[in-house]
Image (cartoon, grey):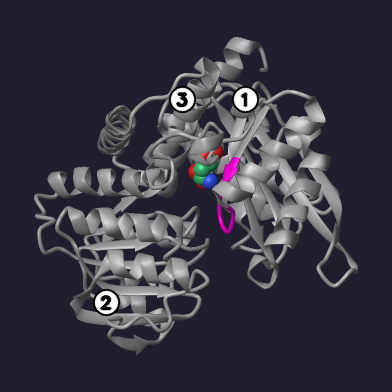
Amino acid sequence: MKRSGSSRLESVDFHAIGISSDSENNPFRITQRQLDQAAEILKLDPSIHELLRWPLRELHVTLPVKMDDGTVKIFHGFRVQYNDARGPTKGGIRFHLEETIDDVRALAAWMTWKCALVDIPLGGGKGGIICDPRSMSQGELERLSRAYIRQVGRIIGLEQDVPAPDVNTNAQIMAWMIDELAFMRGVNEFGAITGKPLALGGSAGRDDATGRGVSLVVREAAKLLNLDLKGARMVVQGYGNVGSHSAVLLAEMGCKLIGAADESGAYYNPEGINARDLQQYVRKNNGLMKGFPGLGKSIAPEALFEIPCEVLVPAALQNQITKLNAPRIQAKILAEGANGPTTPDADPILYERGIYVIPDFLCNAGGVTVSYFEMVQNAYNFYWDLETIHHSLELKMVAAFHSVDEMAKKFKVHNRLAAYLVAVNRVAEAMKLRGWA
Ligand code: GLU
């Protein structure tokens, strides 16, 4: 029976299938609504559409971890394999106190679109553990990481599902995880996890790959808009791996960082903040910018998005730009370093206001692109130099950027919808060829 996307939504008992919240801002419902729009324009086969609205598989795990004080604490985690029509599922593992299964589902869906958009032969997945990593010692983090792999390892593998770093996880955590997996399997299956340290089969250029990708697509957007990045004002929300590397690399292209924020505060300095010095400081200050000399004046967190600037990079968590603050954004380019920073009701407002949005799964695709290069290098057991990585990344990002821009112009739609059109089409083609619908 052919039905429209919205009537399908009504037909599902969300509670029965474990969707935790039906609210407007539930990121999983957001991904479904975004897909529905694309499906309508693409006139997607109804069964392909319905299949793409759901994760194919998910694993919920409960993890006992010995804490430093001798007690055993129980943690909860997830791994979602959203769609593997184009290849093994791929995506990071987040450590976050407010993690939910619906966040992980949404992020796994976005990984599916992201890998398709940069045209790498991988599907989409994501993992998460509900925890507060800042309050844990290195030993506790190691035991938690290993406990996660002892449960999730059974569905991880270079031809199955390949994790990587994400919010609050890093190369050291990937090292513990690949080590645990190696003991479980009795083999060093390095390609089963990416974002590893260089000494353990990591790739040159993986660390700043997401930020480098952000800077490359901002450069392309600036060219289109005839905007000179020399002296362009930039505002960055979040100064972790993505935010800090984006800021540093855009500063190298001439941008001036005039606003920055993280969970410790928001700051405005029209004279310019030294992006690299701030990055060094944050690394030594438990990941937080508070206390860095030169941050300028402290402002309300919501005022950050209202600072007049050329380039705005939200690189923190989801649902930051909504219909409430979108009318007040003063940027020319909105480069979504984070996953899901903009809610769907903000998209038409940004589009009408002529703000050039580089949607998340295009803008931040540099990380997974170099993860894919890492898998290729692990498979060959031969490693590329930094120049080769940078060049190959640039080719992928520039091609993806222009495929989205062309699609947006062809269908007269905003860039996010255009990115969906490109990506969903590719995943649907693979599903059809495999006989899934
Ligand atoms: N966590 C990154 C992302 O959201 C990278 C994923 C990967 O390398 O697999 O794209």
Which residue bears the numbered disc 2? Answer: 307
Check disc 1: other Cα within 10 Å, few if <14, some if 14-19, many if 20+.
many
Please, is residue 332 above or below residue 379 in the view? Answer: below
* Type of amino acid under label 3: Ile
Check disc 3: other Cα within 10 Å, few if <14, some if 14-19, many if 20+.
some
Where does the image place residue 71, in percent across and percent down from the top left? 90, 69
Name the residue located 29 percent from the left edge and 64 percent from the top edge.
Answer: 276
Q: CA distance from mark 2 to mark 3?
A: 37 Å
* Type of amino acid under label 2: Ile
Name which of mark 2 and mark 3 comes first in the sequence: 3
Q: CA distance from mark 2 to mark 1?
A: 42 Å
Q: Residue furthest front?
A: 199
* Type of amino acid under label 1: Pro
Q: CA distance from mark 1 to mark 3?
A: 11 Å
Q: Which mark is residue 88?
A: 1
Q: Quadrant of the N terminus?
A: top right
Name the residue located 71 percent from the left edge and 58 percent from the top edge.
Answer: 141
Q: Nearer the viewer, residue 424 or 339?
A: 339
Which residue bears the numbered disc 3? Answer: 120
Q: Secondary structure at mark 3?
A: loop
